[in-house]
Image (cartoon, rainbow, N blue to C red):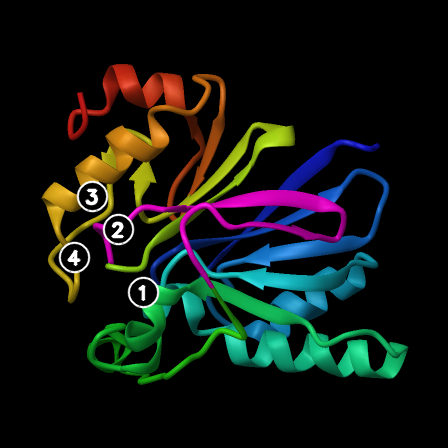
Amino acid sequence: MSEIKIGRMVLSVCQTNCYFLYREGEKEVIVVDPADKGDNIYGALQKNGFQIMGILLTHGHFDHIWGLDRLRDAANGAAEADGREPVKAYACEAERELLKSPRLNVSEQAGRACSAYADVYVKDGDEYTIAGMQFKVIATPGHTAGGVCYYFEEAGILVSGDTLFEGSVGRTDFPTGSMGTLVRSIREKLFVLPEDTRVYPGHGDSTTIGYEKEHNPFCV
């Protein structure tokens, strides 16, 4: 089976990382956190021959969901034309209310209020396979109550959203945030992963679990 690859687009006023995962040489992709301009995300992937099979949300803040509706609509238009099943968006069950509320997801304060929903609400430990790629849901509350990471064990890839950054962690001063909860999530849920696991955060550059265990000032 071919190797899992990950690509990145940096989008929105917050310079948010929108990732797409695919198997080398294949064209089916999973998109993580459609940060803004869903039409542009769809167009860029389509231009390179990619076909969206699923959309994963690490959490519901505006800068991770602004592009969701348009991306999902475009992907589902293509799926319907091809006679495929609809493309679904996945998020944590505990994030349902935050996704829906422009106040809680901070889009109201950001000047472009939005409300969103997932087609599938997931729980800690759930495992799914989309486009031939298996991943595990790791609930990491703290940045928001329903924040999750997605662990692709085969590839040693963790998409961490705004839970864990290179040398830092997500802010916790927005609704449903808690620094104590966030640090516990990282120590108990993420730092138990193999040290060579490559971490792809919601903002900034990638890092590894091993590096963060040794150097992250918030978690040492």
103 is higher (above) or lower (below) than 57: below
In this rendering, position of residue 69 left or right of residue 113: right
Residue type (three-letter) at the residue carrying disc 4: Gly
Is residue 134 found inside the magenta-colored segment of the image?
Answer: yes
Q: What residue sits right under mark 1 in the picture?
A: 94
Please identify the quarter of the rendering in which residue 101 is found. bottom left
Q: Determine whether label 1 and label 4 are within 8 Å by CB.
A: no
Q: Which residue is drawn at 61% across and 74% down?
A: 71
Dots 3 and 1: beta carbons under 8 Å? no
Q: Residue at coordinates 37% horizontally, 83% vertically from top-left?
A: 115
Q: Estimate how packed mark 4 is, as few (under 14), some (14 to 19) or many (20 or more) residues with alpha carbons within 10 Å.
A: some
* Residue 162 colored in magenta in the image: no
- Work out whether mark 3 precedes mark 1 in sequence or the reverse, and give the earlier one: 1
Which numbered dot is residue 141? 2
User: Badge 3 is on which residue?
Assistant: 182
Q: Are the residues at dot 4 and dot 3 in contact (C-beta closer than 8 Å)?
A: yes
Which region is colored magenta? 122-144
Q: Is residue 148 above or below residue 53?
A: above
Viewer-nearest of labels 4 and 2?
A: 2
Foreground residue, 54 or 102? Answer: 54
Q: What residue type is labelled 3?
A: Leu
Give the residue pinned by disc 4.
177
The one of 78 and 122 positioned closer to us in this rendering: 122
Q: Position of residue 164 (x, y in %)?
A: 31, 38
Q: Give the amino acid at mark 2.
A: Pro
